[in-house]
Amino acid sequence: MTSIEKLLVGAIVLIGLALFGWLNLLDYGAKRYDEGFEAAIKVGKDRRDADAEINRQTEMDLRAQLGIKDAAAFKKEKDHAQSLAAAQRRILNGTDSLRCPARPVPASSTPVDRSAAIGPAADDEGPELMPEAAADLIGIASDVERLVRQYDRVVERFEACRAVNAR
């Protein structure tokens, strides 16, 4: 073998070793990348599962609180309905009555020339409303009151949910 042949064989071996090293380095880098990617996915899944469990617990607590409030509201609505029915029965039986004011009702709640500490002026005896009309009137007033209570419950629920989301 001549020196040129030795030099060519050495260059080929050197190029082969360099190519082999480069391919191993690429394979090592790809494995490390895949391991890092899988580790990042696992950390993300663990965090997502932990957050989901916290959210589930928060939701269960909120549902329990709202369930208690709903039960109290249902009882309150039932009590209001019973009170309305009793008041309407008393009006229809003639036990109670509603009267129209004898004079016009002022636009402001307190007249300007009187002190608020004195209290409202006594209403004069006005004509009685017919019992059916009076019962209907308190029924309408009760419906308006029920709508206001429902609106307050909606606002309360919204604020509770907003407080949970603010955490």
Image (cartoon, helix red, strand yellow):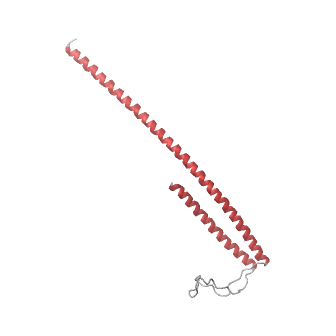
In percent of width and height, residue 44 lies at 48, 42
Q: Spot the residue most to the front.
A: 117
Q: Position of residue 151 (x, y in %)?
A: 60, 66
Picture quarter with the N terminus: top left
Residue appearing at x 20%, y 12% in the figure: 2
Determine the residue located farthest toward the left in the rendered image.
3
The answer to whether 165 is drawn above or below residue 45 in the figure is below
The outermost residue toward the top is 1
Q: Residue at x 76, y 71 (%)?
A: 86
The residue shown at (57%, 63%) is: 155
- Across and down, in percent, residue 79 comes to 71, 66
Query: In the image, is 26 to the left or to the right of 136?
Result: left
Q: Is residue 107 above or below residue 56?
A: below
**In the picture provided, is 133 more to the left or to the right than 52?**
right
The residue closer to the viewer here, 87 or 33, is 87
Q: Residue at x 70, y 62 (%)?
A: 75
Residue 38: x and y, percent? 46, 36
The quarter of the displayed image where residue 136 is located: bottom right
Viewer-nearest residue: 106 or 5: 106
**122 in relation to 71, above or below:** below
